[in-house]
Image: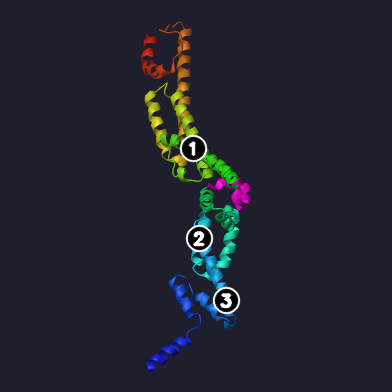
Amino acid sequence: VAQLDEHDSMTSERPWYFDLLMELDAEGWITANIEDYLGADETIASERLLYLEYALELARSLQERAGYLGRSADEQSLDLGETWMGELNDPMNAERVFEEYEAWAKEWRPWEPALYRSQEDWRDEQKEEAHAGLLARFDNLDPSSKPSTIVMLPLLAYPGESDAIETALHSVEQDERRQRATIEKAAAMLESEGYDIGGIRQMDILGGLDNVARLHDLHDLHEDLRLLIAEQIAPFDPALAAHHEQRRTGLIEQGPSADIGGLRLQITAIADNLHQRMAMMNELLNTWRAKGIRFPHADGVRAEELLEWEANLPEIEATLQR
């Protein structure tokens, strides 16, 4: 009897909301603030229970709505989303998180609130699957396409406008595919040339285009340098040209940090030196011709002949002095 009396005493000492707290705790909710809220004023217990029910439903809804923020979300938004998910374990945070999420979605995910508020209308029209598909497709859009969605937002409240929505959304998706095809083509070309394209294929469209443009600029610098070697050094000395071409291709692996300008200065100096030496050799030949000395050919020394003429010059001079 004493044990029963003790049990009854403990039961009577429990707050009126004890069983509810146990249920919520078992469901995974953080209950400390709920307990403070329900225990603050028992005279309005029914009103507080109604608010708690509302807060729980709002928290569940937000957990579903903000669980995935779409491709438009940047790193800061993703961090914010993780914070919301943690805060929503306490339903007493739901109203504040709701206001924060709605403000964020207005800028970053404007189609979601519009589709969320019209969900019942789409369900009534037996278009629930189409509604879910639209949300998934909008969320999958590249951030650069967000301005193109603004004209569609008023239509999302009307299931009867599904064909117009589909036409407009399909056009945006096609434009994205064209841009991504452009990025892929450029990335494949650059990759085949030995450039490190990093994660260009996984970037958003503007990021991908920007990085492709940067690598194209780098490729143009390399191409100019390649042509300089091929046109200004190779005719004189193919082996020397091959050596510097190998140096150039080695710089490709270093990406934008490579000292292309430094190598270009060296190549330009070498090319200038070769051309000056050829001019001096031709000037010397013309001087000899003016003195009546005849050579096997009457034209000047060509680039591919310069090194041979220079190698034979001491012998030629010795012969002419006899």
* Residue 237: % across, % down: 39, 23
Res 194 quadrant in image: top left
Figure disc tally: 3
Residue under pointer 1: 181
* Residue 112 within the magenta-colored segment of the rendering: no
Judging from the image, what secondary structure is the residue with disc 3 in?
helix
Amino acid type assigned to the residue bearing label 2 in the image: Glu
Q: Which residue is rendered at x = 59% and y = 51% of the image? A: 159
Q: Nearer the viewer, residue 117 or 251?
A: 117
Q: Does label 2 or label 1 sit earlier along the sequence? A: 2
Judging from the image, what secondary structure is the residue with disc 1 in?
helix
Principal secondary structure, stretch drawn in magenta? helix
Question: Dot 2, how many residues are within 10 Å of its Cα: few (below 14), some (14-19), or many (20+)?
Answer: few
* Residue 225: % across, % down: 47, 30
Q: Nearer the viewer, residue 256 or 208?
A: 208
Say the numbered circle drawn on residue 62.
none
The Cα–Cα distance between marks 2 and 3, rounded to whole angstroms, is 24 Å
Q: Nearer the viewer, residue 98 or 15?
A: 15
The magenta stretch is: 141-160
User: Closer to us: mark 3 or mark 1?
Assistant: 3
Amino acid type assigned to the residue bearing label 1 in the image: Ala
Say the numbered circle drawn on residue 64.
2
User: Closer to us: mark 2 or mark 1?
Assistant: 2
Q: Nearer the viewer, residue 224 or 109?
A: 109
Observer able to see residue 83: no
The Cα–Cα distance between marks 3 and 1, rounded to whole angstroms, is 57 Å
Residue under pointer 3: 48
